[in-house]
Image (cartoon, rainbow, N blue to C red):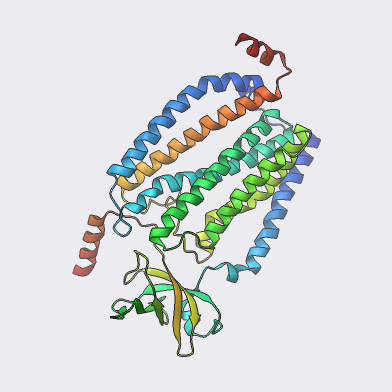
Amino acid sequence: MKIKFPRWFYRLASPRWFYDITSKLLPWFTIIAFLLIVIGTIWGLVFAPADYQQGNSFRIIYIHVPTAILAQSCYMLMAVAGAVGLIWKIKIAHIIAKSCAPIGASMAVLALVTGAIWGKPTWGAWWVWDARLTSMLVLFFLYVGVIALTSAYEHVASGDKAAAVLALVGVVNIPIIKYSVEWWNTLHQGATFKITEKPAMPPDMWIPLLIMIIGFYCFFAVILMSRARTEVLRRENRSDWVKSLVERY
Amino acid sequence: MTPKRKKRLYIILALVFGAGIAVGLTMYALSQNINLFYSTSQVANGEVPIGTRIRVGGMVVKGSVKRSKDSLQVNFDLTDYGKPITVSYTGILPDLFREEQGIIAQGKMDDQGIFQADEVLAKHDENYMPPEIAESMKKKAESK
């Protein structure tokens, strides 16, 4: 089995090339993320209609859902990057995986906190041990474990490997989070967005939500690239291109 | 792929697959315990132990909410469209509590077959809509 990828795909693995291309991409993603989040926030918090049952407290969905989706996507990216790093021994993959973990952990915390704030007025409880909430908490612990393992070793490569293995084992949790509301009786409601169906709310409610989700993805890309660039410089600090880069400043 | 990489790929696939099976079996074994609440039919059929703390989930039956005049005590019927049960609760109900709303009550079954709740949580679904649309949908349903 021999698959040929285009040349840019192989160059992606080079830390230097990654550093150069992200310096071009970064400003664009920053602008788009900023615009989308500003538009989405104002639209969602001011112009979108209130819910017939929950009134205005439902508006926290515009933060809660994007952070929750991102916490899971970020985990998948981290696990896939970890697997690529383990199989092909690509440096940049481990750098990506390492940079993902703190971002995902923050997103998971945000999702849990906004969920609790939403839960108190609507359900009547800050926290309930139902399957969705518990599996989300497990996701946060997995992130913490990955962060800890990455930096627990003397050698960078050993830490990367151990963290990648943990990230891969934890992938089991992702379908559990996603389907928890369908497999078991939970207090948490069903998914807001399903790929196969139309969203169960009118367009002036879901369009701002979609804008927020895309905005958060762009924001995630910005943070991820920035973190990965710093990590590239740190790990490649003996190479000539990094030395000459440092000398220029 | 070189044989070495192929081997590593298989090891990783086996790892993820193995972890999936292990967790899947655990979940399957625990499936009844992971459910947050029992349905009212299960409770009415006596599938739940009397005197232990459990959660019951269902819809509040229309016209069944009876509030006490001099205290916060409230009685209402809960149904899953099978067998209903009567719930008694003293305290402040969540904002979303209303007739035909899904709720979850935590408490114990007493000897008279009344569920003595010490906590009531409101459940809502993912069908968010503006008040005007909810109003017009209600009118449509009534005119049918």
Locate residue A220, reporting x and y percent: 51, 35
Q: Is residue A45 above or below residue A58?
A: above
- A35 lies left or right of A135: left
Q: Foreground residue, B8 or B39?
A: B39
Locate residue A112, reporting x and y percent: 51, 51
The residue located at (58%, 43%) in the rendering is: A105
Locate residue B60, reporting x and y percent: 36, 74
In this view, which residue lies farthest toward the left? B143
- A225 lies left or right of A45: right
The residue located at (41%, 62%) in the rendering is: A123
- The image quadrant where one finds the C terminus of chain B is bottom left
Q: Residue A8 sits in which quadrant?
A: top right
The residue located at (67%, 46%) in the rendering is: A145
Q: Is residue B88 above or below residue A127?
A: below
Residue B144 visible to the viewer: no
In this view, which residue lies farthest toward the right? B4
- The image quadrant where one finds the N terminus of chain B is top right
Residue A184 visible to the viewer: yes
Locate residue A210, reporting x and y percent: 40, 42
- A238 lies left or right of B77: right
In this view, which residue lies farthest toward the front? B70
